[in-house]
Image (cartoon, coloured by chain):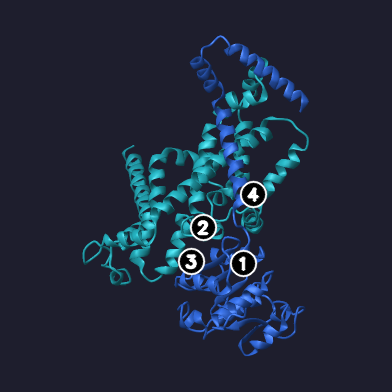
Amino acid sequence: MEGAEARARRRKILTHIVLIIMAFIMLVPFAWMVLTALKTNQESISVNPFYIFPANGWHWENFATVWKSYNFVILYKNTILMIFFRVVCACLTATMAGYAFGRLKFPFKNALFALVLIQMMVPAQIFIIPQYLMVSKIGMLNTTFGLVFPGLVTAFGTYLLKTGYEGLPMELEEAASIDGCSVPGRFLHIMMPLTRSSMVSLGIFTAVFAFKDLMWPMIVCSSATTTTLSAGLAKMQGQYGSEYPTMMAAATLAVLPMVIIYLIFQKQFVEGIATSGGKL
Amino acid sequence: MGNLIIRLKKHFASEKEKISYLDTKGKAAYILHYYWLWILGICFGTFLVLYILLHVFFTVKDYWFYAIFANTTANAGNHSQLWEDFVEYAGYDTKEKKVEMNATAYFDPSVSGGTNNSYYQMFVAVTEAKDLDVLVMGTEGLIGVGSSGRLRDLRDLEDPSFLEEYESRIIYCEPYNEEYSQEPVPVGFDVSDSLLVTKYHLYDVDCALGIGAYTTREESAELFLEFILGKEREE
C-alpha cells in the first residue's frame, strides 16, 4: 500500500519536473526578448552565456528610443480598432449564418454550406489578390475598414456557430414557436444567448489571429499612420535589423496588449481552446 | 416582400397602440428596452454605408505612379525627399491621383527561401492587381524576380526607342518558361549610378529597376527612370 503511494508520488513529481522543463522552454524566448530589450547592443550580440542579464545596468532608454521613433499610440489604436471590428463582425455574421445553417430549412442549404466549408480548405493567400483589388477599387486602402475587410465574414466561425446551434435542444425553439415567437425573435432572444460560449471562443480566436495578422496590414496599409503593430514591427525589423535591444523593446511593447487581454480573459481562452479545438 | 411589409405595418400599429398610454419617458424606455439591438444595428449599418460611400466617391483611388524599393532601410516612402522631388519633377497633382512609394519590403529571390515571407506576398498582390509600375532592388534579386515572370519583358514596351536609348543598361534574366523564350529576357535597367545611390542613398552597391509585368502606366515608369538618371524633363 505504502509502495503504491510512493510510486504515485514519484510519478507526480516526475510529471511536474517534465511540465516545469516544458514551461521553461516555452518561456525562454519571451524572457530573452524582455532581457535583450534592457541590454546594450554589444551585450545583446555576445555569445557569452553568462550575459543572460544586462551586465552594465538595465537600459530602459531602449523603450524610450523605440517609443519616440514609432508612434506606438497610433499603432495601438489601429490594432485595437482592427481587433474590435473584426471580432464584432465575425461574431455578428457567424452567429446569423450559423443559426440559418444549423436551424432553418431553405433550398440548397447543404450546397451553400459546402461553399462555406470550401473557403476553409483553400489557403488564405488565394484570397489576397481579389481582396486587395476590391479594397483598392473602393478607395479603402490605408483605412480601418481596409484592415477589417477580410474579417467581415468567417467560414470557421460559421461552422463553429452552426455546430453550437445544432447542439441545442429542439424543444426550446419549439416552445418559443408555440408561444408565437417569430424566427428573428427566437434567434435573438432564445437561441443566440445560449451560444455565448461558442461566440466567446470565436471572439477570442478572431482577436488573436487579427493581432498576429501581418500580411494583410502590410498590403493594405503602407502608411505609418494607418498600419498595425505587427506590420509596424516588421518595418522596424528593416530599420533596426542589427539593433536587437531596440527591436526587442519594440516587440515587448507590441505584445503588451495581447498579454493584458490574455490576463483578463484567461479562463475564456482555455475554454475557447477546449470548445473549438484551437483551430481557426 | 409585400407580405413582410404588411406584417411589419401590423406589428408597428400594434406597438404604437401599446405605447400610446405611456408618457414620453415611458415610451422611450419601452422602445429602448425592446428595440435597442435594432437601433444599434440601424445606426451601425447607416454609419457603415455612409463611410463606404464617402470613400468610394471622395477618395483618390487611382495612381500616377507606384514603386516598391526592396531591401533598403533608407527613408524612401511617401512624402520622403525622393517622393517630393519626383512629384515635382513629374508635375503630378497628388490631389487628383496618388504617387505611392513603398520602401518597406524585404525579399530576395536570388537566395534560397528569400521569398517565403509576407513582403513578397505583398509585392505579388500589388503586381497582380496591376498597380505596380516599378520595382527597384539589388541586381541579382531583380534577375530572380524577372525569372518569376512578374516583370515586364522590355521587348514588349510600347515605346521601343526607350529601350534603344538605355540599351547599355539592360539586364537580362533566364526566361521563366522555355516556351515563352529560348533566349535571355530583358527585364530591367542597371541604375547603380543613379540618384537612388548617389543622392538618396537607398542602396550601397549595385541596384536595378524593373517594370511591373501588368502595369498600364509604362510612361510613369519611364519618367521615373529618367528622373533617377538625372535627365532633364522634356516639356
- The vertical placement of B165 against A249, above or below, is below
Tell me how far mark 2 sits from mark 1, CA to CA. Answer: 27 Å
Nearest to the observer: residue B225 or residue A231: B225
Front position among marks 3 and 4 = 3
Which residue is the site of mark 1?
B64
The chain that appears cyan in the image is A
* Quadrant in the picture for residue B180: bottom right
- The vertical placement of A191 against B74, above or below, is above
- Asked whether the beta carbons under mark 3 and mark 4 sit within 8 Å of each other, the answer is no
Image quadrant holding the N terminus of chain A, namely top left
Which residue is the site of mark 2?
A214
Of all chains, the one bearing label 2 is A
Front position among marks 2 and 3 = 3
Specify which label sits upstream in the sequence, 3 or 1.
1
Q: Where's residue A48, x and y in %?
A: 28, 71
State the SS at label 3.
loop
Going by the numbered disc 1, the residue's amino acid type is Trp
- Asked whether the beta carbons under mark 2 and mark 1 sit within 8 Å of each other, the answer is no
